[in-house]
Image (cartoon, rainbow, N blue to C red):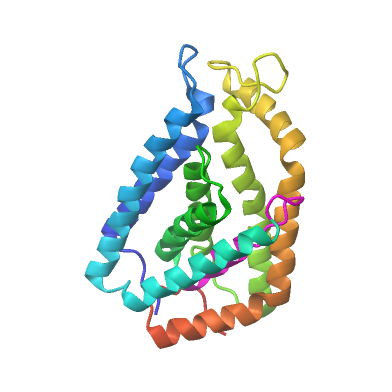
Amino acid sequence: MNARPDLTSTAMLTLAGAAGLLAFVWPLIVAPAATLDGNSQAPFVFALLLPVMLGIVVSELSRGTIDVKSLAMLGVLSALGALSRPLGAGTAGIEFIFVPLILGGRVFGPTFGFLLGSTTLFTSAVLTGGVGPWLPYQLLAASFVSLGAGLLPRATGWAEIALLSCYGTVTAFLYGALVDLAMWPFSLGMATDLSYVAGAPMLENLHRFALFNLATSMAWNLGRAFTTVLTLCVVGRPLLRILRRANRRGTFAECTATVP
């Protein structure tokens, strides 16, 4: 089936996307006199994210596109992603967590993907002790990654793996850049060429951030992209078949890709 998100879910996802983008790019538009406190930002992002997630779940439950079986699959994929994170997280950017996010969003659709990104990163943070002011931004960024996978065009066979690999490469860098951008103002002092300057012209701060991201995170982003592409090429096709078989048998309503 090819059910798309209903009006309420679409509105919720649009709200989350717009507000989430604002939460990431706020360093580029903040006033010069603003008080910067990384810990004070996180509760507001959580306050936005939780009602949006609940609203999506209620909306999908009310129209029957998310039932007990799909919630169980959400839990299984979230647990799989959470368990895969300790396998390489923190070691040269080796991360396997993007694979279940991309495959889950691809097979079960954008709404499911948005929920999957948030629940997976939250569960993994609890398991690995990664809870901190950066967590809300990781939840949103991961949700966008999995949501976007559900919006990719149709493809089959190795063409689909190539599509997902290209998407995984791009989002590996975007994910790292978004999380870095939100936390960048608190990462350095004010005396370096890479430091954030509140109220400076946007292009100047973008230049500073590009240098900061290149110097501090590029190796991790490259490792994340390489790991994601390699894993998709090795196990992507059988995992897609397994998930699609579960989708058909469980009558999950959102499936945006052609079943080979």
Write down the quadrant of residue 250 in the picture. bottom left
Across and down, in percent, residue 225 comes to: 71, 56
Instruction: Give the vertical position of 151 relative to 76 (above or below).
Output: above
Question: Which residue is most to the top?
Answer: 33
Across and down, in percent, residue 105 comes to: 50, 66
Q: How many marks overall?
A: 0
- Name the residue rendered at 66%, 29% in the picture: 209
Q: Which residues are magenta?
A: 89-107
Check if residue 92 falls in the magenta segment.
yes
Check if residue 181 falls in the magenta segment.
no
- Name the residue rendered at 65%, 75% in the picture: 236
- Name the residue rendered at 74%, 42% in the picture: 218
In-image side of 255 versus 82 (left or right): left
Across and down, in percent, residue 164 comes to: 63, 66
Write down the quadrant of residue 109 in the picture. bottom left
In-image side of 256 versus 207 (left or right): left
* Residue 59 visible at all: yes
Quarter of the image for the N terminus: give it: bottom left
- Name the residue rendered at 75%, 58% in the picture: 226
* Residue 105 visible at all: no
Question: Which residue is most to the left?
Answer: 62
In-image side of 19 versus 141 (left or right): left
Across and down, in percent, residue 148 comes to: 51, 58
Quarter of the image for the C terminus: give it: bottom right
